[in-house]
Amino acid sequence: MLNRRNFLTAAVGVAAATGLAACAKEDDSSSGSTSGGSKAIVLGFSQVGSESGWRSANTDSVKSAAKEAGYTLKFSDAQQKQENQISAIRSYITQGVDVIAFSPVVVTGWDAVLKEAKAKKIPVVLTDRSVETSDESLYVTLVGSDFTDEGRRAGKILEKVIAKAGLKGDVKIAQLEGTTGAAPAIERAKGFKEVMDADHADDWKIVVSQTGDFTRAGGKQVMAAFLQSNPDINVLFAHNDDMGIGAIQAIEAAGKKPGKDILIVTIDGVKDGFIAMSEGKINAIVECNPLLGPQLMEVVQKVKNGETVERWIKTKEGDFMQDQAAAALPTRKY
């Protein structure tokens, strides 16, 4: 079975490096020296963007953890464009940072810039998302979730949702995919389909599937189109909460009741998702933990010290049904 650690030959497609300021937002957070007067570790971090509540929480976690660790953080928002991330990484290489970390917009097209980092002996850590590369030594480790397993968990929890709702007959599923080419979109769809093919080949069918680009606006727009072309949809699987929340608006505008007329399962576990679930509009959420900052800083310290780390450091996550939402909501940290 394939997973994030499989390394395939990547199709290299990179943009020429122009000035970083022209294509992405960058800020430096200087935290001073570490204890004992030693020089602070300089970490260059390129974030995908700010497309969702999950991503904002992830960014906040990285920034606060870097400050707590006493690292100098050079942060860049790629605004969901691969060329911006490549420019940011090249800027970090030029600046001679100690470690580079980034959450890749898409899976392929990274070999060239990662080889440049390796040539300068700057270790690279992936966060949240994986890449496909021709050389597994181009990055040290991945800190993040198992997206394929999240897709499987979504399939298994949908079984519970359907049973609880008493849905009989064919399950007609609309799938709101994440950003095309992004690891979570590819792997969540893959894991969900594994459950369908193994256990529900006869009664479940994905009747329509399209990217909503991980945004609420995208989820609303695409779901509205889904309902026009397939008005008999009775289940929605959204690759993140934000698209699911956007879809709820489209469902209500169409005169249907989210969580009842259309059962909804989403992935992430942001606070707004739990609010919608407590209101009965989402039936279940598969958690994907964005609070990776502390784990990342621990890994950066080990990498800087030359210590060996695991190739994939997974995050701890849970699953939640609708009747758990109200009790869980007050403790949600994102």
Image: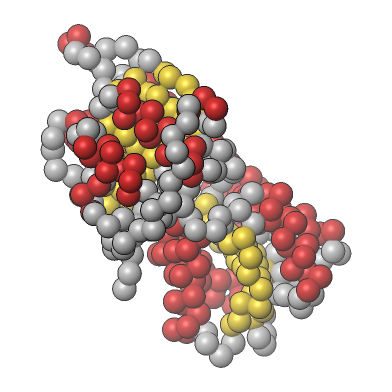
Residue 280: percent from left, percent from top: 70, 58
From the viewer's side, name the closer residue of 275 and 209: 209
Q: Residue 232 vs residue 197: left or right?
A: right
Which residue occupies 78% across, 69% down?
227
Picture layout, residue 200 above or below residue 136:
below
- Picture quadrant of residue 61: top left
Residue lying at the far bottom in this picture: please name it.
202
Q: Residue at x 67, y 87 (%)?
A: 169
Looking at this rendering, what residue extends furthest in the top direction?
Answer: 37
Q: Is residue 233 left or right of residue 82?
A: right
* Residue in view at x 35 percent, y 58 percent: 10
Q: Position of residue 120 (x, y in %)?
A: 22, 32
Question: What residue is rendered at 32% in x and 26% in y?
Answer: 94
Specify whether residue 57 is in view: no
Q: Is residue 164 or residue 78 the one in the foreground?
A: 78
Quadrant assignment, res 115: top left
Decide if residue 109 is in sight here: yes
Q: Nearer the viewer, residue 76 or 167?
A: 76
Image coords of residue 113 (percent x, y): 34, 42
